[in-house]
Amino acid sequence: MKGGFVLKKYIISYDLNKSGKNYDGLINAIEKYNCIKILYSTWIIKSSSSAQNIFDNLKPQIDDDDKLIIVEINTNNEQGWLNKNQWNWIND
């Protein structure tokens, strides 16, 4: 808990389907959160916001044929193959 707010962890993953799509707007919007990129189009963020609020902030950066998912994650039950810095950030 930081500053009285409970920070939840969310995984964000996306597919931008338009050929030549500029990812910069979406990436910049994600990077406004406390975040780490874990895979090519997958990030984890820490935020006191709801998934809906995060989606509302990111939606203007995608087109109607793109895909975007935001899911709160429970890091008490996790497994994967990431580098040590990524695991340290996730478990902090």
Image (spheres, grey):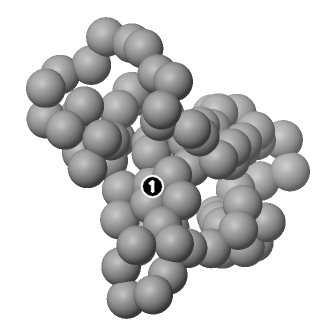
> Whole-percent x and y of residue 17?
70, 33
- The residue sitting at 48% across, 32% down in the picture is 76
Q: Going by the picture, which residue comes out furthest to the right?
A: 64
- The residue sitting at 31% across, 11% down in the picture is 81
> Whole-percent x and y of residue 56?
75, 72
Position of 71 relative to 33 (above/below)? above
In-front residue for pair 65/20: 65
Quadrant location of the N terminus? bottom left
Position of 19 relative to 46 (above/below)? above
Q: In this rendering, would 45 be left or right of 53? A: left
Q: Label 1 belongs to which residue?
A: 45
- The residue sitting at 54% across, 59% down in the picture is 8
Q: Answer with the quarter of the image where residue 4 lies.
A: bottom left
Q: Is residue 31 visible?
A: no
> Whole-percent x and y of residue 85?
13, 35
Q: In this rendering, would 41 be left or right of 16? A: left
Q: How many marks?
A: 1
Q: Answer with the quarter of the image where residue 79 lies.
A: top left
Q: Answer with the quarter of the image where residue 38 lies.
A: top left
Q: Going by the picture, which residue comes out furthest to the bottom?
A: 3
- The residue sitting at 49% across, 81% down in the picture is 5
The secondary structure type at the circle numbered 1 is strand
Q: Residues within 10 Å of mark 1 (few under 14, many from 20)?
A: many
> Whole-percent x and y of residue 50?
70, 68
Position of 71 relative to 27 (above/below)? above
Q: Amino acid at mark 1?
A: Ile
Q: Is residue 51 visible?
A: yes
